[in-house]
Each structure stands twice: as C-alpha cells, then as structure tokens.
Image (cartoon, rainbow, N blue to C red):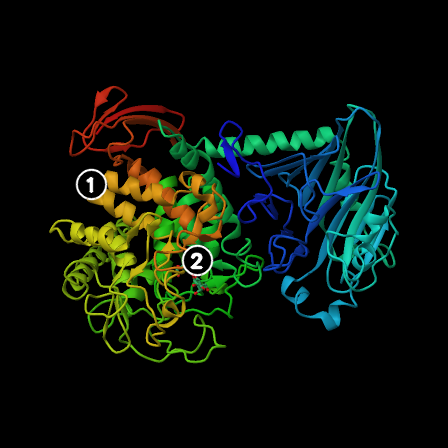
Amino acid sequence: MKFGHFDDEAREYVITTPCTPYPWINYLGTEDFFSLISHTGGGYCFYRDARFRRLLRYRYNNSPADVGGRALYIRDGDDVWTPAWMPMKSTLERYECRHGLGTTKIQGSRNGVTAEMFYLVPLGETAEVCRLTLTNESSVVKTLKVFSFVEFCLWNAWDDQTNFQRNFSTGEVEIDGSAIYHVTEYRERRNHYAVFGVNAPIAGFDTDRETFLGLYNGLHEPEVVLEGAPRNSLASGWAPIGSHCLEVSLAPGESRDFVFVLGYVENPADDKWEQPGVVNKQPARALMARFSETAQVEATVAELRDHWASLLEISTVESPDERLNRMVNTWNPYQCMVTFNMSRSASYFESGIGRGMGFRDSNQDLLGFVHLVPERARQRIIDIASTQFADGSAYHQYQPLTKRGNNDIGSGFNDDPLWLIIGVVAYIKETGDFDILSEEVPFDNDEANTATLFEHLRRSFHFTLENLGPHGLPLIGRADWNDCLNLNCFSETPDEPYQTTANREGRTAESVFIAGQFVYTAPDYADLAEYMGFAEEAGAARKHAARMEGAISEHGWDGDWFLRAYDFFGQKVGSRECEEGQIFIEPQGFCVMAGVGVDDGRALRALDSVAERLATPYGIVLNQPAYSRYHVELGEISSYPPGYKENAGIFCHNNPWVMIAETRVGRGDRAFDYYKRIAPAYLQEISEIHRTEPYVYSQMVAGRDAVREGEAKNSWLTGTAAWNYVAIAHHILGIRPEFDGLRVSPCIGAEIPNFTVTRRCRGALYRIRVTNSLKHGEPLLKVNGEAAKGTLVPYAPAGETVDIDCET
Ligand code: GLC
Ligand code: GLC
C-alpha cells in the first residue's frame, strides 16, 4: 500500500506518490488511437500502429526513466514546476494519479495552485484529449504561465530513432491560431498530420525543440519556461515539438479549465491542400470544435464510462475476497482488452517497433476478451486466419496496419497452427456463431486462394499430423510455445536472432508440449467437424488424438512428470536424466489440461512434481534446475542467466495452465493458491520487490535462481492476462461456455465459502449462487429452483434470466 491503493467503486488505481518502483502506466483508447501514459505523464500515442503512425517521440531505456513524449510546466511568478512531478521532479504538496478504465488523472499542487490533468481518448476520435484544471487555493491572485509540451515523432518510430541524416532535415510545422500542426512529410507521400491545439487564445508558442529547451538542456530545464517567454519558434528540420504558452490569472478560489487536443488527421489524397503549400485543416478544426468546451469533454467521459460499464458487467463475481473481486471484475478483463488492442506491440517493455500481432499470441489473447467484444473477436479470427499458409503453417506475426504476415519474423513455430483452433473454438462456444466456420478466408492474404475457415482449421490440425517425429510426437520446428526452446537452431553467432536464423534441417526434435496441445484441441475440433457434416474427419480426429495420447504415454512420460521434448539428436529434454532442465512446467500443464494421465494417477504425480520442484512463493518457475551455461543444442533458453525469462523465470503465462490442471484433478485449494501467488492485486504489499503495476500482470517474475528474485518485468502485454482470466473465471470459479450450454463447475477450495457470479452469454443472463461447502464430488445444481442433472446448463433464449444455485 506504500505507493497507492485500489478505489473499487471508481474502478481506479490511486497512486499516491510519484516515486513508484517503476513507471506505472495506463492505456487510453479502445479503437484506432492509443496512448500510453505513466503516472507522471510520460509516454506516447499512435494511430493504429505504434511503428508506422507514432505521434510522439519517447525514449526507451533512458535515464532518467520515463521522459519524452509530453510534459506540462507551470510558471508561478519565478517558480517553475511540473504538476505531474516529472520532468522537473518538483516538490509537490499534494500528488495523486488515478489510472482508470481508459482515463488517467494526474494532480499536483504547489504554493496554493492545483493542476489536474485528465487524459482520455474519446470514443470515436483519433485524438488524446487532456482537460487541464487549474485551481487557485491560495488567498492571493495568481498570475500563471502554463507551457504545454509534446515532442513529435517523425511518424515511423524505427526511422525516427535511426535515420538522422534524413530526419534532421525533414521536420515541418504550421501554426494556425492556437493550433500547432505537425506536417512532416505531408508535402510528399503522407496525407496525414498531427495537430496539437488548445481551446483558448495563446500568448505564444514554440515548435523547435532546441529553441524551447536549449541544446544542452534536459526536459527538466527548458530555457523558454525558465525565462518565462515563448519565442514563437518555427521548426525547420531537427526536432519539431508543440508548446503553447497560456497566461492565466486566477482569483483566490477560482478554477479554470483548458482543453488540449492532440489529434491524428487524415485527408483524402485529392484534398490534401487548402491552398498550394497550405495543409487542409478542415478536419482538424472540426475535431477541435468538438472539444472547445469542457462540457463536451465531460460528455465523452460519461460515454467512455458507460462503454466500460457495459463491457464489464458481462461477467462479474461477488465474493468475500475483495482482491479476487477486483481482479475478476475490473483489472483482469481490462488488461485483456488492452492486449486485444496492442497484442505485443507497445508497452514500456515493447518498443512498438519490433513486434506486430503474434499468431499464437493473438489467438490466446482472444480467450480473455471474446466474451467482451465477440464481433471484434470474429474479425480478429478472420485477420489471423488470413495470414495462414495453405499447408496449415503460419506467419508467426502480422502487422496491424496492413494485416499482412511479417516476412521478417517468418514462420516455422509448429505450435502456431493449433492455436487457431483453440481461438475459434473459444469464439464459437461463447457466441454459438457456427456460421463463422463457413466464411471464405484467404491463405497468405491471397484473395485468389481461399477456403472456408473450417478448412483452415482442418489444415492446422493436419499440419501437426504431417509433421510428426520418430516417437510419433509433433516436430517442434523453430520452437513451440516456448520461443526460446530452439532445438534446431545451433546458433553460435551473437548477432543472429534465435527466432529467425536459418535452422538445421532435421526431423528429430519433437515437442511433448505440442502433443499435449494437440490432445487438448482434438475433441473440440472433432465436434466442429461433426457439426460441419464431416463425420469421418471427426472420427479420424478422435483416433489421432488417442494415438497421440499413446505416444505421450509411451515416449513423453518420465516417471514422475511429462518430458518436455526430444532434441535434434533424439536426446531427452526435461527429464531426470538431464543434467540441468530436468522438469518443465509447460507439458505438465497442457497434458493434464488435455486429460492425459487423469485416470491413472500420472496427472496427480506430474502436478505434485510441479509443487515440489517448480512452485515458489512468487509463482511457478518454468524449469528446474535452471541452465547454468549455454547449451547450443537448446538455444535461447540457456542464453538467459538462471532465473530470468524462459530459463527458470516465473513465466506468468503458463502458471494458469497448472491452475487449470489442478482443477482438472479436483484440487481447487491448490489452484486458488497458485492463482493468488501471481495475481497482481494480491501483490500490492510487496511492490518494492515486484516493482511493476499492482493492477496488471507481468509476463515474467524473476525466479528463485535469480539475483533479483520476485522482481517482475514486461507488464501489460502478455498472454498471462487471458490465461489467468480463463483459469479463474472458467475453471476456479468454474463458469464457462461450452458448445451446448454453460458449465457450472466451481473448484476453488475452502478459502472462499460462497460467491455469486453474474454472467451474460448468448443474450441470456445467468445468476449463479455458489455455496462452496465442498461436500459433493460433482456440484449439485438447481436451475430456476429445479434440481438439475449434471453441471451443464443448457443455453436459455436471449433475453431470459436464469437463476442457478450451486452447491459443491
Ligand atoms: C512471449 C511471446 C510468446 C511466447 C512466450 C514464451 O511471451 O510473446 O509468444 O509463447 O514468450 O516464449
Ligand atoms: C525472446 C523472449 C521471448 C519472446 C521472444 C519474442 O525470445 O525470451 O519471451 O517470446 O523473444 O520474439
């Protein structure tokens, strides 16, 4: 609680000191325009693609952390300060930041003046709006000068950070009243520009960074602000910025609002110019007119609140544990929506340059948001499937702007195809929209080569079968879910990426993880095949699954746990026979989720081995013992120092597989225990150790072999969000959509004696009261007062409300 607390009513996290252990950020925007904003106002924004359409420049890995992008300065007499604390690190009498759902409010006070900056990206707009409220709490008249500041990125963020011989000469701006236009490259091939305006007359402006700051000054000592006079500089090349100077006089007790709009505007290609050489500003003027008054901002804030309220009411829980409630009701689904929007592109750990939408990542992310935005999930599925190759394999990534496969990253990750089935199955179970299976979808975005979505799934399924190794287990290819298990790579050259470098040709390295994933996927795939009228295919799929299960039993079981893989030479990976890396988490989770070994005690043994060897107070580490040296035959996994990332770090993404597996064998107490070890709301008290935001999951927490055990990294954009949501909502609380009905099957252990879930699904509303008495092997249900058979509640017609009593 040292750094802040939850405000559950407002659905906000309240940060009470700027000195958090790491910048704690939020995302604004739900459609096309997004902003990253930290608790001190740092960050940047972009239109659709953080690489190609970035508006603000941000310096990653900088010292001090979290500068660049935007800032706001106040000059009160001779006193200059920054109400968001950074960049001047001003001493503030009061500071508070509230990160809410798509909104961030930062407030700072000094010498009787309070400045509150309220940021949002309104629905339907391609702009970041900031309402600034200045209040004079002193007993004297305050005459203030306010300097806004944004630093423009020259659009392509990669080029912006590398191509200085060109970029130092291309920057251009226009000024029009209180609006600053960033028009770099508009003269040639771009038909978009950025505008930064304020709804008040200005006393001056600056657009040239060097003039504003001084060449040898940092953002904490801008010359113009320190001198108190804007210079009306016009950027010509170098680094264009936008800074307004406002003069404000406030009587004691008086408050005034200003509205800043930072927008992205596109003109039709044939309507780019107002006059020769003068940018067409019509759409920008219209945009600013929509925010010329505070009341207009208030209206969009209310709209945004309603938007989130209606999304989040789709699935809620009330339990005696407030931390559980706030994770399930607010923060976990919120993070799922952010990963839906961002995939792995832009966070404080992802530069927004390198990674587009991952094939496997996006399919898994879908599991966490499909119930919130099913129509958009549908579109996402079509987009992903359109990047699949005709042989069933897939580009590992695609670019969000073009929706085309990214050649630079290539393909060959042999788990990829199966995730498409898992994603589509989740979508259909949620929505009942079997029609999607008949959609015509291209391969490799080639409209001349299309097939139904079901055919895409068929090719996914058979891709695995056509690529089996000597033990009848799936070939791993470049890697499977674990990007760093590179069994065919043999990289000895530091400058080549593990992910893309040429692999050895070989058909030996096999993955027990993919085998488990296959067995997990097969029954649902078979059901879909049957639904489509392909009874033979369905039967064959079930046989293939049984055969694969046999292969796992024969060649994938190590005595007390599931083996991880066979390497290029046919040697075991993740076996007691290995010197290091004897046990891995992934196959224990996925094989048990698939039901392998559930009937004969091996599942329990595997999970007990996880508890003995991999579980730590901060979560379950990926493997043990950690690799202490580089193993060229294993690849990147052994490149990380022990305890970090895939080398025995706590990869929070796969912890929920073990949680789900524990529910599969009926051990709800263990499942919930594992849940609490990594759920951020439970980690608030150890924020100094954990360091990242206590309201969202991070990809990785350093494991017990690491020097910095318990320290998290890569917050926000991780499949952790979706899988933990699935683990808690579907398996531990136990309410999940299936093809024919809603499964009600809680498995949470003794700690939560009762809870209520409200779940909307396919238009009906289910109110589920659970008495968790732990008396019955299978929960007893009453549906609308009538005792029911089993735990599957048939779907009710849209519009109906179903009351369910469940006793465990
Ligand atoms: C990263 C990747 C994901 C991969 C995981 C394990 O989170 O985004 O695709 O499965 O690492 O390597
Ligand atoms: C590295 C990381 C892994 C991530 C991959 C993405 O291998 O260790 O977590 O998935 O990069 O390219």
The answer to whether 622 appears left or right of 547 in the picture is right
Point out residue 65 in the picture as x, y percentages from the top left corner. Answer: 61, 54
Ligand 1 lies under 8 Å from the Cβ of mark 2: no
Which image quadrant is residue 575 in?
bottom left
Q: Nearer the viewer, residue 389 or 263?
A: 263
The answer to whether 587 appears left or right of 158 in the picture is left
Point out residue 647 in the picture as x, y percentages from the top left corner. Answer: 36, 63
Residue occupied by mark 2: 385
Can residue 434 be spotted in the picture? no
Q: Which residue lies furthest to the top in this view?
A: 785
Q: Amino acid type of disc 2? A: Ala
Q: Amino acid type of disc 1? A: Gly
Q: Is residue 568 above or below residue 455?
A: below
Point out residue 71 in the picture as x, y percentages from the top left corner. Answer: 71, 47
Residue at image position (50%, 63%) is: 445
Secondary structure category for the residue under label 1: loop
Can residue 6 be spotted in the picture? yes
Mark 2 Cα-neighbour bin, 10 Å: few <14, some 14–19, many ≥20: many
Secondary structure category for the residue under label 2: helix
The answer to whether 113 appears left or right of 367 in the picture is right
